[in-house]
Structures are given as structure tokens and as C-alpha cells.
Image (tube, helix red, strand yellow):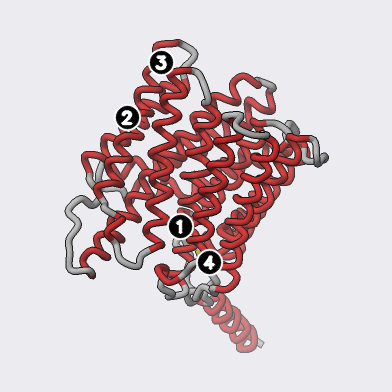
Amino acid sequence: MPKAKALQIRVAEVATILAKARPRRVLAGNTLFYPAATLYAIFVLPASAFSMMGIMGGLTGLASAAGHAHEMLFGFALAVVAGNQIGAMEQTRLGLIVGLWGVSRVTFLLAPQSAAAAAAGIAFAAILAAHIVPRLFRAAKKMRNQALPLVLTAICCSGIAYQIVHYSGFVSAEYTILAVAVLLFALLMIFMGGRILAPAAAGQFYRQGRSLDARIQPRIESGLIIAMGVAVVASAIAGKSRFAGLAAAAIVSAGLLAAARVLRWRLWALHARPDLLCLGAGYGWLAIGLVLYGVAAATGRYQTTALHAITVGGLGTLTLNVIAMTRLQKARRDPSRARLQVWGTVLIGAATLARALAGLDVADPQVLLLLASCCWSGAFALLLVLLIRVRARLPRPESPTL
């Protein structure tokens, strides 16, 4: 009898050891978040346009300009950020985070001022920050590199702040938070876009037998971070006129620095690299949009129109091309040979121009807004086709890194 009991204990110990040694299946964050963000991009802009025009009812969260901006920034764009930064994770945990993002979308669309929408939105932003920010702070050795976790923290905090003021009914504070969030996302895209474009362009110049001396351009990058930081802080307290002027000057300065940076990369001299030209177009839209927004903020005219050059042109073009490039590289496909993202970039450019013309009252605004939303959705529908066609090679099961 004692021998049988000892044997049972031994078997149980071996089973425990084997269970602990069994590898857990992990997935990169972009495996789930990129398709989810793409599907949401296809849906949200036309739904928002139809809701604000009274053509479609039921989606209360999209029936206002603030709700539309919230879902574009903290629904679509924040999902792309999550896919880009969240890293490899055990699939059950990743699925729960994606599910929480989905719950926050549904609750905000149907009942934007409910406690459920506020709780889901706050929880998603807080969990996202908790997963990505500490790791990035530990990895950042240089002061400039600490800008990335700081910006991501500020973006998540702005999402939480919006939910609090929206639930509390402080409508006047919503637009200030959204304007600050646009600048934070612009700074994130400027930082990440430069870190992607500069080495890729330098590598292509090397293959062409030439060199690119202006790569990261640390002085310009530092100037961009400082200018955008001043713009963010000044915009947050822009109720006083002197801070509004400071914000406008800082935004224009950042736009000019971004334009100088992208011009020094000489992307037009690259051979057979439409993928890098598309990324450059997104960076260019950011530069143009910042200059236009700074001027609009200084004059008090066409601010919403200028903001869309940043969000639709810059954010839309860069996110589309980063998602496409990531999927192609994971599948060991040459990004320069794909064409769907090129046509997607053209459609987003058309959407940006149509949205700008709608704000300038050049033609029927409703027709132009519908055209802009259709072009945007068409661009991300092409991206969805690319994601379906190109199957990423998943890594072998291993222990999660987060």
C-alpha cells in the first residue's frame, strides 16, 4: 500500500513537471489587432458619416463630431498602436485584451455616456499602457528614445481622461482632449515613421551603390520632439490667448522640421520602392497637416479641415502601410513588389482631398464627405484583401515575453 501511494505521488509530480514544461502558444499582438483595426476602419468612417447626416440611426456614439473623432483615435488608431507595440503574448491573454477593445467599441457606439462604455474604455487604455510602457522605458537607453513610452503613456491617459469627462458631462473639455490626442498621435507617427523610413531608405540607397548620410537626423528629431511637446502642453491650456499663440507656433515649427527631415531622405531617388514612397507620402501628409493646423489655429479658421490632413492623410496613410509592410515581412514577402497598399495610399490621398474640400465649401459638403468616407473604406478594404491573401508565418510556440 505505501508503495502504491508513493507511485501515485511520483506520477503526479511528473505530470506537474510536464504541464509546466509544455510550451504555451503565443501570438504577436499584430496578429489579432491589425485585422481588427482594418475591419473597424472599413466600417467606422462611413457609419459615422451616415450617422451625422441622419441617414443611419442606432449608433449614438458616431452621431457627433466628438464621437467620430473619439472612435477614429481611441478606437481605430489605438488598436493599430496596440498591434504595433504590444509584442508577443500568450494567446488567451491577447484574446482577452482584443475582446476588451471590442467591448469598448460596442458600448461606446450604442451607449457612449453609459458607465459600461466609460469602464471598458478606461480599462482598455490602462491595460494597454501597463503592458507596453514599462518594457519600453526599460529598453530606452537614450533620452530621445524615452519619447516613445512617454507619448504612449500620454495617449492612453488622454483616452482615460476623455472617458471621464464624457461620462461626467463636461462637453467643453472633450474637444480640448481630442485636439491634444491628435497632436500626440502625430508625434508618435513622426517618431515611429522616422525610425522605419530612415534605415529602409539607407539600405535601398546602399543597394543602389549610393549612400544616405541624413538618416535618423537626431538633431531634427530632438527638435521635433521638443516642438511637439510644447504644442501638446500649450494646446492643453490654450484657453489663454498667449498659450494659443505658443501652440500654433510650435505646431508650425514641428511641421516645417518634419518637412525638412523627409526631404533630406531623398525618397524620390529610390528605384522600384513604391512601399517606401507610400510611407514617405504619409510622413509628408503629417508635415503638411501640422503646418496647416498651426496656421489655422493662429487665424482661428479651418482648424477642423487642417486636422483631417493629419488624421486622414498622415495617420491613415502611415497606419495602412505599416500594417501592410509588417504582414508582408512576416510572410517573408518583398514589400516593394506588392501593389495593393499603393492603390490604398492613392485612395487615402483622395479621401484627404475630398475631406478638405468639404471643409472649404467648394462643393456640396455631404457629397464630398460621403466620397471621402468611401475612398477611406476602399483603401482599408484593399488592405484587408492583402491581409487575407498573405498568410503570415507564425512563430513556433514559446514562452510569452510579456
x and y percentages locating residue 143 in the rendered image: 26, 40
Q: Which residue is mark 4?
A: 27
Label 2 – label 3 distance at C-alpha: 15 Å
Q: Which residue is mark 1?
A: 322
Of callouts 3 and 1, which one flags the residue occurring earlier in the amino acid sequence?
Answer: 3
SS category of the residue bearing label 2: helix
Q: Nearer the viewer, mark 1 or mark 4?
A: 1
x and y percentages locating residue 210 in the rendered image: 17, 64
Q: Amino acid at mark 1?
A: Val
Which residue lies at the image location 40% right of the left edge and 62% below the top edge?
274
Of callouts 2 and 3, which one flags the residue occurring earlier in the amino acid sequence?
Answer: 3
Q: Amino acid at mark 2?
A: Ser
Left or right position of 175 against 395:
right
> Can see residue 150?
no
Residue that sits furthest to the right in the current view: 57
Q: Which residue is mark 3?
A: 243
